[in-house]
Image (tube, grey):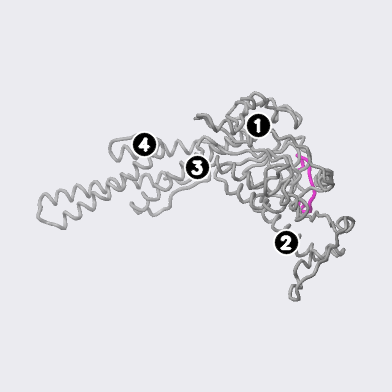
Amino acid sequence: MSINNLHSLLNGRWFIHESYGHSLLPSLNSILKGNSLKIEKDDKKPEAFVIQFGKQPVAASSFGNTDNNNDYVLVMDLKNPIYKYSQECGPQGTKSKMNILSRYQNDPFCKGVVLDIDSGGGQVSGTPEFYDFIREYSKPVVAYTDGLMCSAAYYIGSAADHVIANKRADHIGSIGTMIYFIDFTGWYEKEGAKVITQYATKSTDKNKDYEELIKGNPEPYIKNQLDPITEDFINDIKKVRSTINEEVFTGKTYSATDSVTMGLVDEIGTLQTAIDKVFELAKQSSNQNLNTDMSKQLVKVQAVLGLDAPLASTAENGSYLNAQQLDALENSFVELEASNTALQTELDAATANTDLNDQLIASQETVATVEASIDTMLTSAGLDVTGTLSEKTTALSAKVAEMGLKDGSKPTAVKVDVKNSSAASNVVDGFDISGAMNN
């Protein structure tokens, strides 16, 4: 372990469940006594898993080196104490996790991410940044836990689009902040060192809260350091969990079932449930993008034709032309074509009249603009229609009616027999990955 990483363990503030923090003390004590931790490095340990629809998981690193044209979900573990930077004798830091996720963000076959969480929390530093990263991720993210999802781990998981807990999950919540440090002054003095601390004349407030904490007066540190961090924590949770119960902000933890009631979790399920949810959200997002593209083109048509009423809109179908507007659109086409015919007749009778020629050109340009917008909408809707404006309008109207009847809120459930397994086995929430790891 490097000196910098050891320093990060001994100092700073923590989003951590207390019992989880205490479980780390034996390792820390061993390090302080000069004993090195014997950790066998597994160079084959994958950074994340790739799971295709209805198939077994494959190590993401090996999957990335093969030609692939199938949709998949990236499953990333968050099953250790959370640190900002990777530990030489411990887990990857949040910085490394974000770098890995960024690599998959632009892969069109990656439909989204599952954060597979079993952690009691970790450092304050880096956690809000990871929360922001997940919240702004361009693909669907689902958080899942079958163990601990506490403090920093919940902070990060809450930023996902959907949160799922196994019915046997241990503890969820622990929203709050604590200072967890060791005063080594006595240890240094026992070793023969003399600790001297002095501040410059004008540095009256430097480390003041910390010094008071060491002296046994924690109130300034709590008020000036811990409370503001906790307020940010709570406010960030409220931004993404609008229905959350205020009672959870005392730092209490809950069972999986109670977490649903308190608004910490969206549903009870398994890892497969989380994977299926990513595919479902990705499909919904794709449909929304199609509706958005068509909506933009419809706005152009509204502007060109000067429709008085705004485009109809629903949360399910986005913006679309209603029956009245479609009638107005068809009438406008008729009027434009009639005007074009009349101008052409007048122009034939007076070919030298420049004004009439300009009017004809303007009318033809208007018709061309409208037809181009209609063609773009037809392309966005996946239709290949040629013919007159009236024929194209009829096809578009039929497509709008078809989209209005669709219901994208019912996911296809894929049932998988998921079995529990120990952390030391080659099974990921019911998936046997030993074969994938050896390949």
Q: Please tell me whether residue 250 belongs to the stretch shown in magenta.
A: yes
Task: Please report contact status of discs 2 and 4: CB closer than 8 Å, yes or no.
Answer: no
Residue 63, compared with residue 344, is above or below; it is: above
Instruction: Measure the alpha-carbon separation of dots 1 and 3.
Output: 39 Å
Question: Does residue 159 appear left or right of residue 422 in this picture?
Answer: left
- Label at residue 288: 3
- Front of the two marks 3 and 4: 3
Question: Does residue 378 appear left or right of residue 160 in this picture?
Answer: left
- Front of the two marks 2 and 4: 2
Q: Please tell me whether residue 323 belongs to the stretch shown in magenta.
A: no
The local secondary structure at tag 1 comes to loop
The location of residue 336, given as percent across then percent down, is: 26, 48
Residue at which label 4 appears = 395
Q: Which amino acid lies under the numbered mark 3 shown in the image of this protein?
A: Gln
Which residue is found at the position 42% from the left and 48% from the top? 296
N-terminal label among 2 and 4 = 2
Q: Which amino acid lies under the numbered mark 1 shown in the image of this protein?
A: Lys
Q: Which residues are magenta?
A: 247-258
- Front of the two marks 1 and 3: 1
Q: Which amino acid lies under the numbered mark 2 shown in the image of this protein?
A: Pro
- Label at residue 44: 1
Estimate how packed mark 1 is, as few (under 14), some (14 to 19) or many (20 or more) residues with alpha carbons within 10 Å: few
- Front of the two marks 3 and 2: 2
